[in-house]
Amino acid sequence: MTVTSQVPFVRIIVLTFDGGDMTLRCLQSLERLDWPADRVEIVLVDNGSLDDVAERVKRDFPSVIVLEPLANLGFAGGCNLGIMHGVRGSIADQIDHVALINNDATVDSCWLRALVAEMDADPRVAAVASKMLFADRYAPLSIEILDELEGGRRDELGVCITSLRVDGVRCDERFQFDEGFHGAVDPDRARDEEFARWSRRSAALRLVDPGEGAHRVSLRLNAKRPLRVRLSSDVEAVELVVGEGGETRYTDVEVGVGSARIDVINNVGSELYRFGFAGDRGFMEPDVGQYDEPAEVFAWCGGATLLRARHLDEVGLFDERLFLYYEDTDLAWRARLHGWHHVYAPSALVRHHHAQSSGVGSEVFRFHTERNRLLVTARNAPLKVLTLALAAEIRHCVRVHLALLVKRPLMLKMPSRAEPRHRRKVLGAIIMGLPAALRHRWSQPAGDRRTVHRRWERDKW
């Protein structure tokens, strides 16, 4: 089919892996798009699911094209299968644009129209990023250390939360910790800690919308030294001292929650950080209008984006060796090296249930993000950046082994083998993948290996 209409023809690709009702809700939202029905087609790629979602889609969504490879091709392979379905030769001869949307997301009715409008504004735009919000709305809580912490360092420990209750009921999974918190650490079960999460100087703790009416949130806190702390909600602020008696003494505090609810940002385009780390622009920030204007971005999130078919013909598709994670960063980086750029469309609204397939912090998530970051860096980054990133990874692996396999036994503690084993697995996979990544790098014309000009505010090498 040769494109002749002035209205672009868009192929929307949805991947599902045991997505069940989430996938159906995604397709229902796509059916409500404000876009001519004859200028869009939806392709569902069932990535080896064990549920019955493919049969349900065939029955309830007859216009959706269902592809069943009978295997999990990963995000990269599944998207490529959907993009190339029925295509012979040039993609742009049959499709104007390709839209990608996660099956655990739902779209606003004007989502596609907003994406295409930004794409049409500049012929060198390769991709348009959506405004992705977390699907849930949250009741906001904040923790602030009122004492001046020694040194004032950003990573200084504040208080540790070891228990959470809403109206007396434990519900850890209903709380979201922003980037003012450190990652979770092992709780001290001997002291009845349910979990352990340390804050920095200030942090936001958010509760998935608890419903109407008044609610009480209870926290158990400790600290390494006495700290004066303020716990605030939309209706109440409580000041207290935590850490008197040291880390072994706990302080219980309760605060009321009112009717205020906020949207929280998942992604408004992607940024590039030191050592090749890619990150969600705006991640975990309350949506208060700070990203309501279009902007150029370094990259985009594959969970909700629009890709120009002509740029795919020039740059290529996703690298299927990456399988899962960083494949969108790789494709976006390659496009930039070919002179394309990417923009963000604030009106293209998506609500996303974050990391429902693999889970943030899962072994699948950790392995693929850590391996793929280094391989994508090897393919695209300046050699100095690659050298520093590899050195940092090797140094981290050595430190983990010394701390958990050597130092712990010297302190008469049992060695901890899981993390060293994970680090060896990641480093081994990086070493195995490096030759192919470097061959790709040096196979490109010299002009395509130029350093990307980094004018992004948070892109510091």
Image (tube, grey):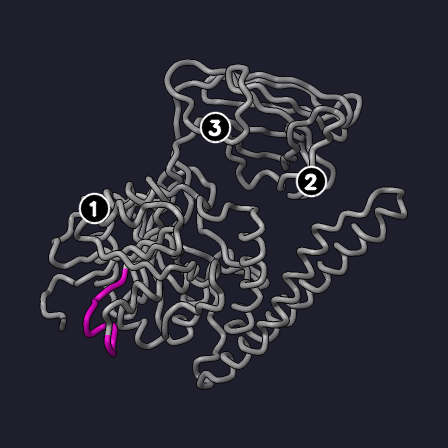
Residue behind mark 2 = 156
Residue 58 at what x, y percent from top left?
A: 22, 50
Q: Residue at x 58, y 24 (%)?
A: 164
Q: Amino acid at mark 3?
A: Leu
Residue 325 at what x, y percent from top left?
A: 48, 58
- Quick one: quadrant of the C terminus? bottom right
The answer to whether the residue labelled 3 contacts the one labelled 1, judged by CB atoms less than 8 Å apart, is no
Q: Residue at x 64, y 22 (%)?
A: 220
Residue behind mark 1 = 59
Residue behind mark 3 = 207
Which tag, 3 or 2, sits closer to the chain's start? 2
In three-dimensional space, the C-alpha distance between marks 3 and 1, rounded to whole angstroms, equals: 38 Å
Q: Is residue 298 visible?
A: no
Magenta-colored span: 88-98
Q: Residue 374 is drawn in which quadrant?
A: bottom right
**Element type at mark 1:** helix
In three-dimensional space, the C-alpha distance between marks 3 and 2, rounded to whole angstroms, equals: 24 Å
Q: Nearer the viewer, residue 152 or 33?
A: 33
Which tag, 3 or 1, sits closer to the chain's start? 1
Q: Is residue 20 above or below residue 1?
A: above
Q: Residue 447 is drawn in which quadrant?
A: bottom left
Residue 240 at what x, y percent from top left?
A: 65, 18
